[in-house]
Image: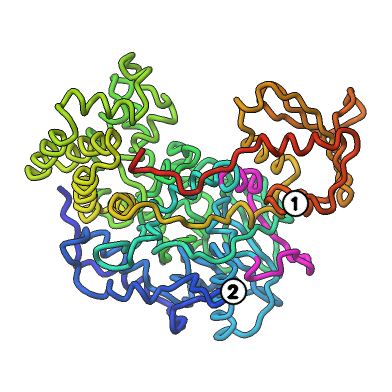
Amino acid sequence: MVDLSFEDRTDFENADRGRVASLSPGVVKAADGRVVWDNDVFAFLDGECPDTANRSLWRQSQLCARQGLYEVTEGIYQVRGLDLSNMTLVEGDRGVVVIDPLVSAETAAAGLALYREHRGDRPVTGLIYTHSHVDHFGGAAGVIPGDNPDGVPILAPAGFLEHAVAENVYAGTAMGRRGVYHTGVLLPKDATGMIGTGLGQTASSGTIGLIPPTRDITRTGQEETVDGVRIVFQMTPGTEAPAEMNFHFPDRRALCLAENATHNLHNILTLRGAVVRDARVWARYLAEAVELFADGTDVAFASHHWPTWGRDNIVAFLHEQRDLYAYLHDQTLRLLNQGHTGTEIAELIEVPPALAAKWHTRGYYGSVSHNVKAVYQRYMGWFDGNPAHLWQHPPAAEAARYVDCMGGVDAVVDKAKRYAADGDLRFAATLLGHAVFAAPDHTAAKQALAKVFEKLGFGAECGTWRNFYLTGAMELRDGIRPIPTSIAGGMAAGLSNEQVFDSLAIRVDGPKAWDTALTLDWEFTDTGDKHRMVLSNGALTHQRRTDRTTGTPDATVTLTRPALFALLAGKGTEGITATGDNGALGRLLALLDQPDPNFPIVTP
């Protein structure tokens, strides 16, 4: 067991360094008066850690809850504590270059206003997205108009738009639902509820949008100048996001590490769901960052947490982060090649004591346990090779059989309570999970499982584990509270026609469409694009129409891109005309399924 040095106040000193001012009150509202961000609710963190929270996570949340405008170095400022992520502002010749405009337009606008209050009314002369996660681009319309009429240069890593869409639109409904657990957004903000995610406190709930990039960064060493600010880029694809980049300000001796090196162990696979990341290349890019930039750097900052000052401190920080990801990757591969499964490896691996004693390697956001399983998954997939696990029953059917073998739900609940009383909360949760899935209306089983989840949550060092456990307990007790999701809708303007049609294909009810054959041509009057769409054997495919496209469609649909977005949002067919089979489009729309943003998780 590693003995953490709670007397070490270095992180607190760095988190407070350069503070200019705070937003007072620390509340941001939408135009209709709805509160979309409230950092003041975390004032309870100023007190001593109670027995309802892990002391290490409590400390991390105290640091993440600091809010305001901070000077990083001359001409570079950060807004922290106004959303899950940080917004960085780099002063140029004429205005200010914004890096990562938070989750929501409202919080980004409030952060920019706080900056301008203390640094003058500088125009936004550039925008940089470090990577393709929504908390780094969703608030863009809060710093520049959504249609970017002034042509502000917007820089992003190559592949940014594709990956932003894939994560937030294609699987957006399921990720949004799991995100409720991940961020603990519905939990009370108090010592028995949500105290933070480890990466930041939580995400704002304002208006999410996407303004497409105007300039791609495609190679390491690429140099761009924006409003007189020189920037040298390092491509880091496959690390914390599929499209991500670090970059250096040589004239300011400052390094932006995006989300590749923050003050915690990050995720190889997030609990909300994502593409599995590559811990091997992650470690290598951190080593490369030291090689490329360390000698010209006096401060390193990221899109979460607080900066690190001093070349030697930066190098030590990056080397330890490098070693952390490399160790988890390599030891997982070593053990899987000895025949261990992901679950077994997660129990076997211990982080080296010298690393585990560092605050910035602790698993506040990504845990060693689920990261090791993610490395296993990347190489070996979901199947552990044991034929007994090849064709198991789905959870509810399996649970019914387990419960039957153990003598009924009441007997299972009694056994689980004994395990919980003996301190084996993990197995108690397993037993009670079977009981609930076998008999979802069994009140005693649900209440017992909620109590076990609560205890597990109170003890978790990982913020997202705590949020998952406590949200599960809340839903077992109170049911599912519907929550609106709007990420995909807010990003519509940034989607290509192909991406819109891909998202349409995902919604086709395959079995219902087995016997329907349709061919539709789509012609966009505002862009000139032409597409051929084919429904066959329950699969909806599409491609751009060219001179080589043959055959006669059932119908030709003529429309604009805004009309397409309105159609898919269920707002009718105004502005859309069809020639040929007038009923073809309606038959297609009738085959579309509606995703469920509030599907059950802890019950069947």
Asked where in the image residue 211 lies, by quadrant, the reply is bottom right
Asked where in the image residue 599 lies, by quadrant, the reply is top left
Q: Judge whether residue 250 can be spotted in this image.
A: no
- 524 versus 75 height, above or below: above
Report the residue that reaches farthest toward the top.
387
Mark 1 packing: few (<14 Cα in 10 Å), some, or many (20+)? Answer: few
In this view of the protein, which residue sits in the foreground, 274 or 307?
Answer: 274
User: Of marks 2 and 1, which one's residue comes earlier in the chain?
Assistant: 2
Residue 515 x, y percent position in the rendering: 69, 21
Residue 462 x, y percent position in the rendering: 30, 52
Q: Quadrant of the C terminus?
A: top left
Q: Is residue 593 left or right of residue 255?
A: right
Whether the magenta-drawn stretch holds residue 338 is answered as no
Q: Which residues are magenta?
A: 141-167
In this view of the protein, which residue sits in the foreground, 254 or 380?
Answer: 380
| Residue for point 28% across, 20% down | 338
- The kind of secondary structure element at disc 2 is helix
Whether the magenta-drawn stretch holds residue 145 is answered as yes
- 540 versus 529 height, above or below: above
CB contact under 8 Å: marks 2 and 1: no
| Residue for point 55% across, 58% down | 136
User: Would you name the residue on which mark 1 appears?
Assistant: 572
Front label number (2 vs 1)? 1
Report the residue that reaches farthest toward the right.
547
Asked where in the image residue 522 lies, by quadrant, the reply is top right
Q: Amino acid at mark 1?
A: Gly
Q: Judge whether residue 207 can be spotted in this image.
A: yes
- The kind of secondary structure element at disc 1 is loop
Residue 274 x, y percent position in the rendering: 49, 42
Mark 2 packing: few (<14 Cα in 10 Å), some, or many (20+)? Answer: many
User: Would you name the residue on which mark 2 appears?
Assistant: 109
